[in-house]
């Protein structure tokens, strides 16, 4: 296995923990993401200053990265919202729609033709999500939020592909997350007005989980992902991301015993999604040349 694909798999495995950590943290989804990004940018700034890797970017490029960071911040908020309104397994399952969104949207960014095979394979995963949505109505709101989260993650990856070549990954990550932090800070008063909460400060345990979430599942995973994205296509990246539900759902079953609350429609749908992942990964290894 070539190094970029290996880096992607390690990043996806780390992201598989985010759902489990998102459920154990008692903050609502907006505050959870705000604190996650705050811890991350403070840590990154320290690392960049210590290693002298911080690059100062032109104003136009800074604004672009801030905008990309805003997209990823809202994606995270929707992802954790999906967990709160459904559960970890459902939220992660929705990420399997990334392949379809990428197959449809990437040609708009690259001016290439839509690849019918990629669309058809991705529809297999969508069918799995539909089965869960149709037969488990209690999860419908969480699924809708989860699909919005996935769409935003694909848009993030497509924009990110355009800016990863000229700057080091740590600097890109820092500027993007600063942009995400700024947009969340601006929106937070409105958000808390619409969805008020009594808990604004993390508990002691929350701080521990937030640090782990920031250091390993954010800095470590994003660094590996950005580094790999310099060598692989966006489609390859997002198909690899389809393994995140597999890792995360296994962890949710082990930690929270969520398998006790999921009906047969979930397992049928997940079986279709897992089949699409296997077929797509075989296609990548056979047909996609990764340098």
Image (cartoon, rainbow, N blue to C red):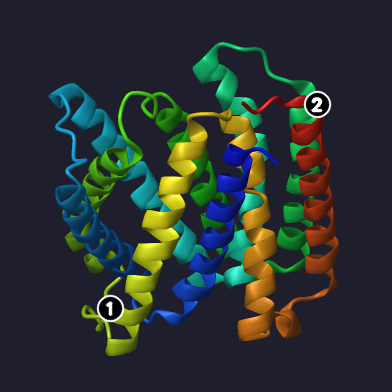
Residue 195, image x, y percentages: 31, 69
Residue 108, image x, y percentages: 54, 18
Residue identified by numbered label 2: 117
* Label 2 vs 1, first from the N-terminus: 2
Q: Is residue 27 above or below residue 234?
A: below
Task: Identify the secondary structure beneath mark 2.
Answer: helix
Q: In this view, does 284 lie above or below 20?
A: above
Residue 55 appears in the rendering: yes
Task: Identify the secondary structure beneath mark 1.
Answer: loop
**Label 1 environment density (alpha carbons within 10 Å; few <14, some 14–19, many ≥20):** few
Of residue 113 and residue 145, the one placed in the foreground of this image is 113
**Label 2 environment density (alpha carbons within 10 Å; few <14, some 14–19, many ≥20):** few
Classify the position of the C terminus by image quarter: top right
| Residue at point 27%, 59% (across, down) | 40
Residue 59 lies left or right of residue 69; in this view the side is left
Residue 171, image x, y percentages: 26, 40
Residue identified by numbered label 1: 197
Residue 77 appears in the rendering: no
């Amino acid at each position: 296995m070539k190094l970029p694909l290996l880096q992607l798999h390690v990043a996806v495995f780390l992201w598989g923990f985010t759902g489990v950590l998102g459920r154990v943290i008692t903050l609502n989804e907006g505050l959870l993401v705000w604190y996650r990004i705050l811890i991350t940018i403070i840590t990154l700034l320290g690392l960049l200053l210590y290693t002298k890797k911080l690059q100062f970017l032109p104003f136009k490029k800074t604004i672009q990265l801030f905008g990309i960071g805003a997209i990823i911040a809202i994606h995270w908020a929707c992802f954790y919202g999906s967990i709160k309104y459904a559960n970890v397994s459902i939220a992660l399952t929705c990420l399997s729609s990334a392949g379809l969104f990428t197959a449809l949207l990437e040609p708009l960014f690259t001016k290439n033709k839509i690849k019918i095979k990629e669309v058809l394979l991705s529809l297999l995963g969508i069918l799995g999500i539909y089965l869960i949505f149709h037969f488990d109505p209690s999860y419908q709101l969480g699924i809708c939020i989860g699909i919005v989260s996935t769409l935003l993650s694909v848009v993030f990856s497509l924009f990110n592909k355009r800016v990863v070549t000229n700057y080091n990954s740590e600097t890109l990550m820092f500027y993007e997350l600063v942009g995400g932090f700024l947009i969340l800070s601006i929106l937070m008063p409105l958000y808390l007005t619409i969805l008020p909460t009594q808990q604004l400060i993390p508990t002691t345990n929350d701080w521990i989980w937030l640090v782990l979430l920031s250091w390993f599942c954010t800095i470590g995973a994003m660094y590996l992902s950005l580094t790999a994205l310099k060598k692989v296509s966006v489609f390859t990246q997002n198909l690899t991301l389809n393994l995140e539900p597999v890792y995360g759902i296994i962890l949710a079953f082990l930690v929270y015993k969520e398998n006790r609350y999921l009906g047969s429609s979930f397992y049928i749908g997940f079986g279709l999604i897992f089949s699409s992942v296997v077929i797509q990964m075989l296609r990548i290894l056979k047909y996609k040349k990764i340098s």
